[in-house]
């Protein structure tokens, strides 16, 4: 009995030891298989940037004088292309500049406003001319080739105060030149104005440095600030345009004058006037004073005074077509001092265009500014070519990327 009890105790002890060893082995195995794995970092891809536009100039909120205001921009993640009016391409287009209107943002529709309130160009700056005193809102917008807004729209806007107290209003006559000899019939008078805001408010209430122009023929400009600056019917014309054409001008000596006036037609105080004296020569040997607009004046007869300038009295007619936001001719050539007639055909339906002539590509000094018309439409422009031979610059004021060379020989 004693041996049997010892044997059972021995076997029980052996079983307990084996269980303890098995448990220790299991724990040791678990420790080696549950070590912390090395973590792997997954980088997040950089999101694709969207087109952006920022107005970089003017930097403040005040412009120190009326006249020209240049808006400059900086653009990122967008490609400029001179494909105005053509098929769209992803990430490609141009800029629309706006003044005192909201930038249109309706998808699929051209982002255009009234003529004179927007300009389309691929340039990163645009100069607004004849900006009057007061607060003005300038906007820029990235658009597709077909002038429609991006989706979502990309627009930047600033508000500027233009100070009118820099200098007095001034006026000069650029065409015709004082002492010039011109062809009879129609005589174009063009002016340049500074420090004065030309507005279509004829007869309205006056506002500081705001008004229009009175043109006069063969009469002195009235300067009494208490009375309208008007003369006999047929001797004056009132308009906000910087050019005016006198018709049926007879042969002989004539004076042409221009005057800045208030909205109610009264002269400024002090008055601002300019005048030139020219000679209108006979253009035909007959008694008919006005030749047809498209007919070149015949050569002078033997009774004509000797040695006139070779281009005096010449008339040249040109055809100019706008289509798909481009002129059909890269250059126009005319004789110096000639009377120029341009048959302007705007074939871009619903889009405003014009012809404007400047001394250089800076477009800071104008020679002739044609009326803006929306297509499809036609208009006839008449003006006198510069007397000095050389290369001049023409463009569409609404879409300055439409331009060319005006050659005077």
Image (spheres, rainbow, N blue to C red):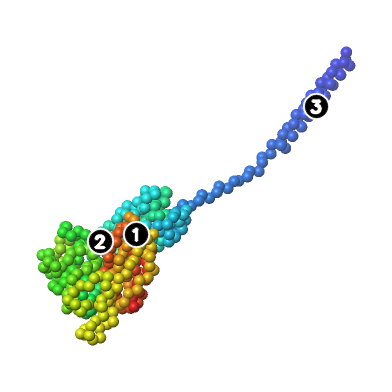
Q: Is residue 68 left or right of residue 144?
A: left
| Place of residue 313 in the rendered image (x, y in percent of width and height, measured from the top left) | 25, 77
How would you rate the neighbour count of disc 1 (Cα within 10 Å): few for under 14, some for 14-19, many for 20 or more?
some
Q: Residue at x 39, y 49 (%)?
A: 108
Mark toward the start of the polypeptide (1 vs 2): 2
How would you rate the neighbour count of disc 3 (Cα within 10 Å): few for under 14, some for 14-19, many for 20 or more?
few
Residue 31's disc number:
none
Q: Residue 374 lies in what quarter of the image?
A: bottom left
| Place of residue 132 in the rendered image (x, y in percent of width and height, measured from the top left) | 25, 62
Mark toward the start of the polypeptide (1 vs 3): 3
Q: Residue furthest top?
A: 1
Q: Is residue 85 above or below residue 229?
A: above
Of residue 12 and residue 145, the one placed in the foreground of this image is 145
Residue 18's disc number:
3
Mark toward the start of the polypeptide (2 vs 3): 3
Q: Residue at x 16, y 59 (%)?
A: 203
Residue 133's disc number:
2
Q: Is residue 25 above or below residue 287?
A: above
Of residue 61 and residue 189, the one placed in the foreground of this image is 189
Task: Please say if the residues under marks 2 and 3 sit with CB atoms less than 8 Å apart.
Answer: no
The quadrant the N terminus occupies is top right
Single out the mark in the foreground, 2 or 3. 2
SS type, badge 1: loop
Query: CA gap, disc 1 to disc 2?
Result: 36 Å
Single out the mark in the foreground, 1 or 2. 1
Q: Residue 32 lies in what quarter of the image?
A: top right
Q: Residue at x 12, y 64 (%)?
A: 228
Single out the mark in the foreground, 1 or 3. 1
Kindly identify which residue carries mark 1. Answer: 347
How would you rate the neighbour count of disc 2 (Cα within 10 Å): few for under 14, some for 14-19, many for 20 or more?
many
Query: CA gap, disc 2 to disc 3?
Result: 104 Å
How many marks the image carries: the answer is 3
């Amino acid at each position: 009995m004693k041996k049997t009890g010892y044997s059972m105790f021995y076997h029980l002890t052996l079983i307990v030891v084996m269980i303890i060893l098995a448990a220790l082995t299991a724990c040791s195995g678990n420790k080696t298989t549950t070590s912390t794995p090395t973590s792997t970092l997954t980088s997040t891809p950089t999101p694709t940037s969207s087109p952006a536009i920022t107005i970089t100039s003017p930097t403040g909120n005040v412009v120190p004088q009326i006249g020209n205001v240049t808006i400059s921009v900086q653009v990122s993640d967008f490609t400029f292309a001179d494909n105005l009016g053509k098929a769209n391409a992803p990430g490609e287009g141009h800029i629309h500049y706006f003044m005192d209107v909201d930038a249109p943002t309706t998808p699929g529709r051209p982002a255009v406003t009234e003529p004179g309130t927007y300009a389309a160009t691929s340039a990163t700056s645009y100069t607004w001319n004849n900006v009057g005193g007061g607060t003005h809102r300038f906007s820029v917008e990235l658009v597709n080739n077909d002038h429609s807004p991006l989706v979502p729209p990309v627009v930047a806007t600033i508000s500027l105060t233009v100070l009118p107290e820099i200098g007095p209003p001034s006026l000069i006559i650029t065409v015709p030149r004082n002492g010039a000899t011109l062809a009879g019939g129609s005589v174009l008078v063009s002016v340049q104005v500074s420090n004065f805001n030309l507005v279509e408010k004829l007869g309205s209430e006056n506002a500081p440095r705001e008004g229009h122009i009175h043109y006069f023929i063969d009469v002195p400009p009235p300067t009494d600030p208490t009375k309208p600056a008007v003369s006999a019917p047929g001797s004056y014309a009132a308009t906000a345009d910087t050019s005016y054409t006198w018709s049926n001008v007879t042969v002989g000596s004539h004076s042409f004058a221009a005057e800045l006036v208030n909205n109610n037609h009264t002269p400024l105080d002090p008055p601002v006037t300019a005048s030139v004296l020219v000679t209108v020569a006979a253009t035909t040997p007959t008694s008919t004073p006005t030749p047809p607009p498209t007919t070149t004046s015949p050569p002078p007869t033997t009774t004509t005074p000797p040695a006139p300038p070779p281009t005096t009295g010449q008339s040249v007619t040109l055809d100019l077509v706008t289509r798909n936001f481009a002129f059909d001719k890269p250059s126009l050539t005319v004789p110096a001092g000639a009377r120029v007639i341009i048959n302007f055909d705007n074939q871009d339906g619903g889009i405003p265009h014009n012809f404007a002539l400047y001394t250089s590509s800076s477009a800071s000094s104008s020679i002739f500014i044609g009326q803006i018309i929306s297509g499809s439409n036609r208009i006839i422009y008449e003006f006198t070519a510069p007397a000095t031979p050389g290369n001049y610059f023409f463009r569409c004021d609404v879409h300055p990327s439409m331009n060319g060379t005006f050659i005077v020989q």
